[in-house]
Image (tube, rainbow, N blue to C red):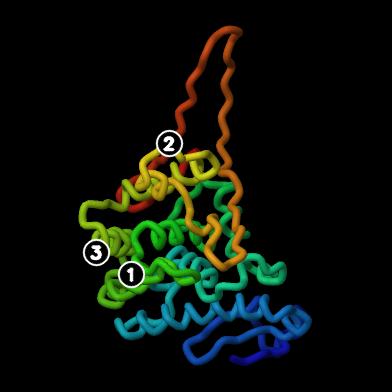
Amino acid sequence: MTFWDCKEPADEEAFDCDNGFAVLEQIIMPSPTYRARSSSCIRMIVGHELFHHVEFAYTNAGGGAGCGNTFGITACEGQARAMQDKVYSDLDLSPGASCIAGFQTEVNGYLGSPDRELWSSGYASALFWTYLMEQYGTFNEEPYRGADFITAWWELAEDRVADPDVYGITADTIKLFEPKATLLNTYHDFTIANLLKNFSLLGLPADAQARYSYIDEKPHLNQNNTMTFNAVKMTATATVGANQTGTLDFDAQNSAVTICDST
């Protein structure tokens, strides 16, 4: 890992960098950004960049280079943002851990604006990958709960670098863990969970409670975890007269290649 004194906007000769990024050989961190930051802040950023190295390794092993230009930002940045939350067990409540680009910030950003194309939502798709890990992954311990789902995703992706169908890879990874499940139905459950997570689900069967809530929001034994996600934004206008009732329908739209949440 290398810390650089990044260039000023007027200095065209100096080395440039953003909030921290990875290349195949190293992680590059800008000293002006991090010299006064907390250790939890730096560890959180490094956790994100370390997962980029994992992505690079699988992509390169399949004959490609990098990640984003091959599999797109939703797979590469969304997964990395989700995985930075899985690296450490002590950062959920650390005030300094969301110093630059926090997992919870991206989650709340998506929930505040869910009517976007999932496959172009980039970092904000971290919530969707978290949902997939919780629903299909078999690792049950914190903080790496469900990370085996992402491992399986990249093992398939390595063989498909020449035809990087992110939708297909995700659908096939789901079927590795649950042969009868589909990506379409999982996405619909995801959109429902984003609403129902804020309601009491005690009257539902245990499998339905798990399907429509997030483990990451629940307290964990011997850990002081109170991660909470914002309520999902739902916009609609209706006029209901006195002594009348009305119904509002909210649909999750999708197509073969693009899945959108129109709420």
User: How many marks on residues?
Assistant: 3
Marks 3/1: CA–CA distance: 10 Å
Using the rendered view, name the quadrant where residue 60 is placed.
bottom left
Q: Where is residue 224 in the image (x, y as percent from the top left)?
A: 62, 64
Q: Is label 2 in a helix, a strand or a loop?
A: loop
- What residue do we see at 46% from left, 83% from top? 53
Q: Is label 1 in a helix, a strand or a loop?
A: helix
Marks 3/2: CA–CA distance: 30 Å
Under mark 3, the amino acid is: Leu
Q: Name the residue under label 2.
A: 203
Under mark 1, the amino acid is: Trp
Say above or below: 68 vs 34.
above
Which is closer to the viewer, label 2 or label 1? 2
Looking at this view, is 92 or 247 the one in front? 92
Q: Where is residue 257 in the image (x, y as percent from the top left)?
A: 33, 53
Under mark 2, the amino acid is: Gly
Res 174 visible = yes
- What residue do we see at 26% from left, 52% from top? 181
Marks 2/1: CA–CA distance: 34 Å
- What residue do we see at 46% from left, 61% from top? 130
Say above or below: 29 vs 192.
below
Q: Are marks 3 and 2 in contact (CB under 8 Å)?
A: no
Res 188 visible = no
Q: Mark 1 points at which residue?
A: 153
Q: Where is residue 241 in the image (x, y as percent from the top left)?
A: 59, 10
Q: Name the residue under label 3.
A: 176
Using the rendered view, name the quadrant where residue 169 is placed.
bottom left
